[in-house]
Amino acid sequence: MNTTKQILLDAYNFRHACKLFDATKKIQEEDFNFILETARLSPTSFGMEGVRLTIITNDTLKDQIKPLCWNQDQINTCSHLVIFKTRTKDLQPYSQWTKEKFAQRGLPQEAQDLYMGVYENFHTSLKSDDIYEWGTRQAYILFSSMITSAAAIKIDSCPIEGFEKEKLEKLLELNTEEEEISLVCAFGYRVNEQSKRFRLDTDMMCEYIK
């Protein structure tokens, strides 16, 4: 196996949902910037880049957030707590944001208008809460890149879906007419060794149609 493949497999084997971090160990700025760069370079549907990140390193704020996340120890023992937010207002068809995202491709106005029409039809085909739900799926793409790149440099992570969304948005003073929280993820360094991992064999997960 070549080196690149082995590096990636090592990262996936290292990664696990870390339940308790060493609060005395902080991620270096250079390392966290590397993790953020992999998020920035991640794909999003229509290239809309409709995810914003709030990165929290303030221990007092993490202590305030913990009760809103089912009192999970990851919240206030981690080095960096990342809040993934969906730009619900910006992602609306014909918003200034979407116009600028299509315009940056350098296409003639006729082509931009055509793309915007496809984009509008796509959202029309979804349910009433389509922007938030669709945006949240984009957030998970960035999240996946971040936890993998973190693992590649031996930094642990834990996704947190157990949180009180409205209360957390209020604490962070978000304008929920413009953006909503999709996901929370903690990053840091483990205290305990990784527990045994259980995964399906590939042939139980996959089927081929030839």
Image (cartoon, rainbow, N blue to C red):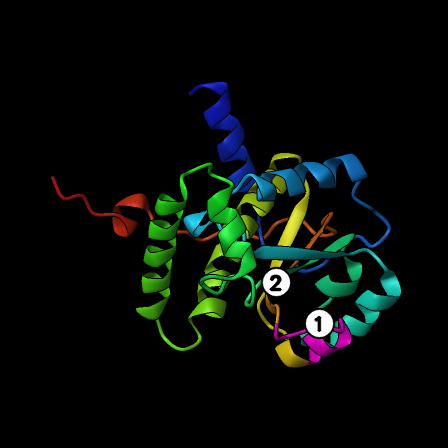
Which of the labelled discs sits on residue 85, or is there none? 2
**Quadrant assignment for the N terminus:** top left
Mark-to-mark CA distance, 1 and 2: 10 Å
Residue 151 or residue 94, whichever sits in front = 94
**Quadrant assignment for the C terminus:** top left
Q: Residue at x 30, y 69 (%)?
A: 125
- Residue 43 in the image: state x and y as whole percent: 47, 44
Residue 50 or residue 133, whichever sits in front = 50
Amino acid tagged 1: Leu
Query: Quarter of the image holding residue 18?
Result: bottom right
Which of the labelled discs sits on residue 20, or is there none? none
- Residue 194 in the image: state x and y as whole percent: 61, 49
Q: Which residue is mark 1?
A: 174
- Residue 17 in the image: state x and y as whole percent: 59, 55
In the displayed structure, 177 sits above or below 26; it is below
Amino acid tagged 2: Lys
Circles 1, 2 touching at the beta carbon (< 8 Å): yes
- Residue 110 in the image: state x and y as whole percent: 35, 46
Q: Residue at x 39, y 55 (%)?
A: 116
Q: Which residues are magenta?
A: 167-177
Q: Element at badge 2?
A: strand
